[in-house]
Amino acid sequence: MTESKGTVVLIHGLWMTPKSWDGWKARFEAEGYDVLVPGWPGVTDDIEGLRKDPSVLNGLRIKTVVDHYATIIEALPEKPIIMGHSFGGLMTQLLLDRGYGRVGVAIDSAQSAGVPVLPPSVIKSGMPILGNPLTINKTVLLNAKQFHYAFTNEMSLEESEKVREALQIPGPGKPLWQSAANLFTNTGDSKIDYKKTDRAPLLFIAGGKDHIVPPKVNRKNAKAYKAGVVEVKEFPGRTHYIVGQDGWEEVADYAISWAAQH
């Protein structure tokens, strides 16, 4: 029996489930890693069931999600590699800030607190939630055009619909409202100690065509860190659906190679 290279914990983002990581999980396992893909509290791969009744996600806040993953990681025999996509990238940053993980990779990551950059495409992508204050303790399911703009803008609308139907669940509004509230001050659930000297190495991966998190957001987020190893790698032509878009294997291979090196 081949000895494991270690454990990788994959954290999905808003509107997604662990299923969004299926390709990465299989690829990393083939490379000799143990891979865990836990859902956010209340999130399973029962996409149809969650669409019918997403009430379990109402009011779900960032700290609750981070605490959930911290408990899972604490039960592991050693610190894992942590990788997160979108809001999962923010969870990765917060877990490393707490001292969990031996290395982190934040992919198209939602920004942590006190990173005041808000390009127009970010505002447009967030409007299905932030455009209605009543969504703060509810969930929102993106329609075809909203999903296409936010996630799959390099695909045809027809191709995008296949992805949306296969993967999307209603997203809780609370995390996005929290993130927006802490945009200009380093406070709240997404607060980071940017001067922490013993943080594990952190890589930001940015998609050049991402509307939800354009590369300038990841670069600004990375610059907020004043200590430790923090790098940014941009993949041109990649959208927010970077973990499943054609060519995702290149991104996955870069991520695991960087993690192994650090």
Image (cartoon, rainbow, N blue to C red):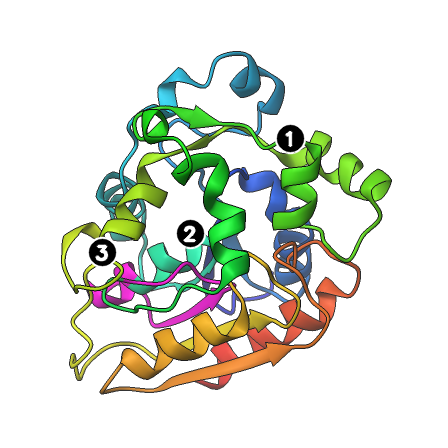
Inspect the image, locate mark 1, and give the three-letter code of the amino acid beneath it: Asn
Disc 2 is placed on an element classified as helix
Left or right: 141 as drawn, with respect to 102? right
In the image, is 121 to the left or to the right of 138? right
First to last magenta residue range? 94-112
Residue 242 x %, y % = 65, 60
* Residue at mark 2 to residue at mark 1: CA–CA distance: 20 Å
Local secondary structure at mark 3: loop
How many C-alpha atoms fall within 10 Å of the one at disc 2: few (<14), some, or many (≥20)? many
Residue occupied by mark 1: 143
> Mark 2 or 3 closer to N-term?
2
Q: Residues within 10 Å of mark 3 (few under 14, many from 20)?
A: many
Which residue shows up at 39% across the image and 31% down it? 132
**Could you tell me how far apart the alpha carbons at marks 2 and 3 are, in whole angstroms?**
14 Å
- What separation in Å lies between label 3 and label 1 (alpha carbons)? 27 Å
Name the one closer to the observer, 80 or 182: 182
In-image side of 158 versus 152 (left or right)? right
Pointer 3 residue:
182
Q: Is residue 13 among what the camera can see?
A: no
Name the secondary structure under disc 1: loop
Asked whether disc 3 touches disc 1, contact meaning CB atoms under 8 Å apart, the reply is: no
Where is residue 28? Give x, y as percent.
62, 62
Label 1: few (<14), some (14–19) or many (≥20) C-alpha neighbours in 10 Å: few
The magenta stretch spans residue 23: no
